[in-house]
Image (cartoon, rainbow, N blue to C red):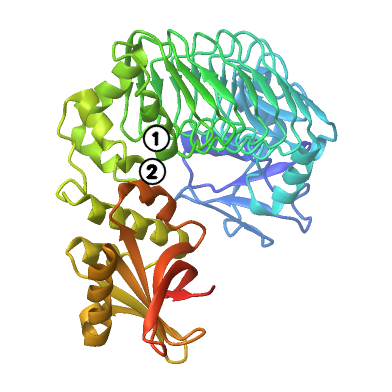
Amino acid sequence: MIIRNRTFLIAENVSAARRQKLTREIFLRGGIVCAEPDEKTDYVIFDAENEYLRNRKKPADTNALQITVNEMTAMLDCSEAPAQSEFLVVKGVLERWLAEESDRSVLKIPEGVRRISANAFRAVYHDQESVYRKRRKMITRIVFPKTLEVIEENAFRDFRSLSAVSFQNGLKSLNGFRNCVKLGAVAIPKTCTEIGPYAFYGCVNLRDVKFSEEITMIGAHAFHHSGIESLHTWEKLSRISDYAFADCRNLNTVSFESSQLVCEKRAFRECNALDDVNVNEGSVSIHVSTFCAYTMEKCLKALESDACGSAFAKMWKDMMISAPSAFSRRLEWEALNDLRPLCRRFSGLPLKGRDDDITDPVKLEGLKRIRILQKETGLNPKVQKYYRADRLYYSYLTANGLIGSIDTISYDPAYEKIVRETERLYGIRVYHVIESYVPWKSLILLYVEHDPADWEYGRPSDGWVSAYVHNFELGEGEFGEVRVSSYDGALYRIG
């Protein structure tokens, strides 16, 4: 917004120092003012409590002080007035983008700008945001000056058509490109030492990032939900903050080269494609929750073939030793629970888990199958709790199939008798039961074989489960596979 020949009004009871500060704020905000005192336009009134009101009434204080543009410019220092109408630059700081004056696709930040303020390219007032949104959508490229040193948070947020940026050497702190969804590549200049929080958050197409080897810190959420494919750290990098690379679905390789690197909580959370973690000799501090369960499973399995003296093995051993209880909790994930014995052998620590108090391998297999059904079908988690306590439960539907429930098998003595006789006769262990009336009344016994060689093939998969189906009409049963789903946490037969 160009400010020409306008009169600004500031209440008379404002001090001289406050008046000068308010004058500057009017200038920065492109104040809503009147061209002539008697015209029916907006006024800006600043009261003694430092708040302003926007309305279409004349100022309540008829003795309000009037300041012209020339007087304002003098107060701010003419040398600091914007060199061009598109930007407002004060003492080397780009404070405001005047979107009404821009109609171009390439945004060139003027020389002399040392800092770009947070939210400089967003509207001050809500009713102006539509103009700013339209102008941001036009920008496809940004060129930065050699004098630029700092880009603050959210400076270029939501530039959704931006596909290229040109940084110059001299930039020290980089931030501000959140949700620039079309940005595909970034080359960070060698002078940059810091990437701030949320710098490239949500840049889903940002696959190629050339990092500066002078960067010492990557801020929280800096590349969260971005498209980055690989990360190779460097010697001077000392910290990767919380969630810095979380939810990067394309990230498949991470190499830790730094000798004193600290990776904080959930830095690589939900990076499910990450299956290659390389560690060179040095001191790397990795938090237990840095990686997601999928990555931990892949990396821990790699230890079986890895030499215990390697840096990769040392990293995992250090994680286990530094926080054994936290590491144990992470291993409670079903995908990781089978790796607990390996971790015990590898670290020498008594990593205690939720199933360590169970010595019967058949019961452990039953728990595994219950967890699979919980994950695949939504089986009530209390079934697992009760089974751990040697209490067998069964699922059933009531109210014409409108209510799903579970109850102890001893609730119906006839059901309990069928279960015990079947276990004794066929040498199996039942871990859950389903009452079914489709296609006839039957009792479906989900079981575990006593031969471990059959366990892998007998586990539930895609809703199909190994079962013994007892037909009440015939008074006998047969083994086979049935397909199940759940309602309100209770299993029922669908095939």
Q: Position of residue 189 (x, y in %)?
A: 61, 11
Q: Nearer the viewer, residue 3 or 37?
A: 3
The residue depicted at 77 percent of the width and 26 percent of the height is: 141
Q: Residue at x 23, y 80 (%)?
A: 416
Q: In the rendered image, which quarter contains the N terminus?
A: top right
Q: Position of residue 357 (x, y in %)?
A: 14, 49
Expressed as whole percent of the image width and height from the top left, the position of residue 97 reads 70, 33
Quarter occupied by the C terminus: bottom right
Q: Is 158 or 279 nearer to us in this picture?
A: 279
Q: Secondary structure at mark 2?
A: helix
Label 1: state its secondary structure: helix
Mark 2 highlights which residue? 335
Q: Is residue 132 left or right of residue 354?
A: right
Q: Percent x, y for residue 109?
A: 72, 21
Label 2 Cα crowd, 10 Å radius (few <14 / some 14-19 / many 20+): few
Residue 424: numbered disc = none
Amino acid type indicated by mark 1: Glu
Mark number for residue 297?
Answer: 1
Q: Name the amino acid, label 2.
A: Ala
Q: How far apart, in angstroms, are the residues tagged by discs 2 and 1? A: 7 Å
Tell me whether the residue at label 2 lies in contact with that at label 1, contact meaning CB atoms closer than 8 angstroms: yes
Q: Eyeballing the image, is 164 above or below 436?
A: above
Depicted 177 relative to depicted 456: above or below: above
Label 1 environment density (alpha carbons within 10 Å; few <14, some 14–19, many ≥20): some
